[in-house]
Amino acid sequence: MKKQPARTEKKRGKRADLADWLAATQPREIGDAEFEELRRALAPISESYLRKLLRESGAPLSCLVEGVRQASLDQLQASLLRMLDEYQRGDARHGARIRQVVIAAKDHARWAARNPERRAEKEEMVLWMLTWLENPPVFPQWAALRLEKLRIDTHVS
C-alpha cells in the first residue's frame, strides 16, 4: 500500500494575507507606497482585486488608492469630490495622476454601459466624469444641479 503524503496546511487566501498585513502594519492610511508594498507581498494579484479587498477591509485609503466609486451616483459624486480636493491641493504631476484615475474610471463605465440593463446608469456616470475632467472646479455645483434635475425627472415620470 502506498503511503499518502502528509497533509499540508490549507492554502491561505489573499484576503487573509491582507488582514495579517493590516494587523501587523496598522497603517494610518494606505497610499501609493503601501499599495505597492501590498502588490509585492500578495503577488500575484491584480490592481483591481487588491483595491476591492482594500475597500472591503475598511482600511483608510488615499483617494488614488480607493479610485472612483461607481456603485451609485451618490458614491460617484463623493469620490469625484474627494478627487477634486486632492487635485486642487497637489502639483501638476499629482493632478495628472488623478486625471488618469478618473479617465480609467470613465473608460470602465463606458465598458459597463454595453450591458443593456445598466446602460442608462453608466452613461450618466460617464457624463459626470467627463464633466469633472472638462472643468474640475465647476463639478461640485454642476453635480448638485444634475442630481436635483434627476430627482425632479424621477418624480415626474
Image (cartoon, grey):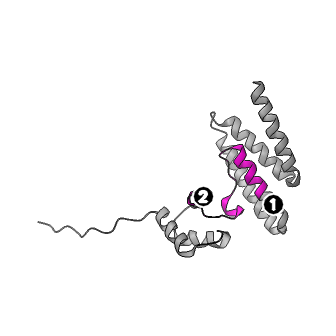
Q: Quadrant of the N terminus?
A: bottom left
Kindly identify the amino acid type of the residue bearing the numbered disc 1: Asp
The quadrant the C terminus occupies is top right
Q: Nearer the viewer, residue 97 or 19?
A: 19
Left or right? Give the position of 8 relative to 109. left
Q: Secondary structure at mark 1?
A: helix
Residue 154, image x, y percentages: 75, 30
**Direction from residue 53 to residue 5 in the image, left or right:** left
Main secondary structure found in the magenta portion: helix
Residue 66 colored magenta? Answer: yes
Tell whether position 54 is magenta. Answer: no
Residue 85 circle label:
1
Q: Secondary structure at mark 2?
A: helix
Q: Which residue is mark 2?
A: 55
63 is higher (above) or lower (below) than 32: above
Residue 131 pos. (x, y %): 83, 47
Q: Name the kind of residue labelled 2 in the image.
A: Arg
Picture residue at 70% right of the left edge, 35% below the top: 120
| Highlighted magenta segment, given as a residue range | 55-82
